[in-house]
Amino acid sequence: MEAINKMDSELGGASWEPGTPPTYWLTRFVILRLLGAIYVVAFLVAINQIVPLIGSNGLLPVGIYLKQVSAALGSAQAGFLRLPSIFWLWHSDSALLIAAWFGFILSCIVMAGYANAPLLAVLWFLYMSFVHAGQDWYGYGWEIQLSETGFIAIFLCPLLDLRPFPRYPPPMPIIVLFRWLICRIMLGSGLIKFRGDKVWRDGTALYYHFETQPIPGPLSRWLHFMPHTMLKIGVWFNWLAELVAPWFVFGPRLVRAHCRSYYRVIPVHHYSQWQSFVFKLAYHHPRLSLFR
């Protein structure tokens, strides 16, 4: 405890004792660094794929799409208000790549430990520009999820101070919003399964999942041949993690720790799931649990 208190003092945080309000210095530090890493991957994907997808000769050219939106809404101004994007101003192939590279560079700065509200706001608007212009390619839940996460993160850091550990602690309402976000994500994931195919409701979904998943993992074949009893237990554990645990995200520390333990065993296959991991950090105790 003394070592951690000393580190907090050196980083700008006040020494913490039991019974004092939490400050979440380390939570903010880790959330922003990992969010920067996710932004790096997202913009790197755009650098490599955006021109073939929505470029002037791409599969779904953004210029044609923006003209259709303008015609449907009556003007380009109305289109911008409905779908804000920097590409209403300039949407050549060069503009797409410049925006992607600029976002990538800013993301690297955030990942390196330097972030403030204007920087996060620019990153958010750049990525939202791709989401609103990306059509089918950017219409998935994880793209919208990253946009929402990026917006909330704007208010997690100071207005101007770029230091990794700024003078003031993060606002507690923003930590609560991150908890609310992971609650919605997990509940939504569980409800989609429950209202979908009956194989989830009768517990047999994992009989087929590992042989049909789009991106099988190195253990997929081994898991597929596990006893059906074990596979059914896996489905029921999924219900516990996605439909029961999220209701306790606003509980006391001990309850949140139990909820977090269920999420730790859920495998990560896509960078959207890494986003969910970032939100789960908001469950943590402000000091010690980051080291456990």
Image (spheres, rainbow, N blue to C red):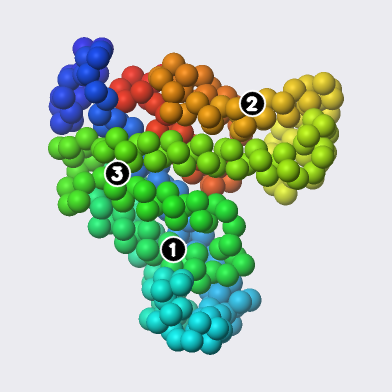
Report the Cα–Cα distance between label 2 and label 3.
30 Å
Judged by depth in the image, the label closer to the viewer, 2 or 1, is 2
The residue nearer to you, when weighing 248 against 287, is 248
- State if disc 1 and disc 3 touch (CB < 8 Å): no
Upstream in the sequence, badge 3 or badge 1? Answer: 1
Give x and y (percent) for residue 57. 58, 82
User: Visible in this render: residue 94?
Assistant: no
Q: Quick check: 137 above or below 273? A: below
Upstream in the sequence, badge 2 or badge 1? Answer: 1
Q: Quick check: 17 above or below 164? A: above
The residue nearer to you, when weighing 236 against 207, is 236
Name which residue lies at 52% across and 56% down.
Answer: 143
**Residue at label 3?**
156
The residue nearer to you, when weighing 123 against 105, is 123
Judged by depth in the image, the label closer to the viewer, 2 or 3, is 2
**Residue at label 1?**
128
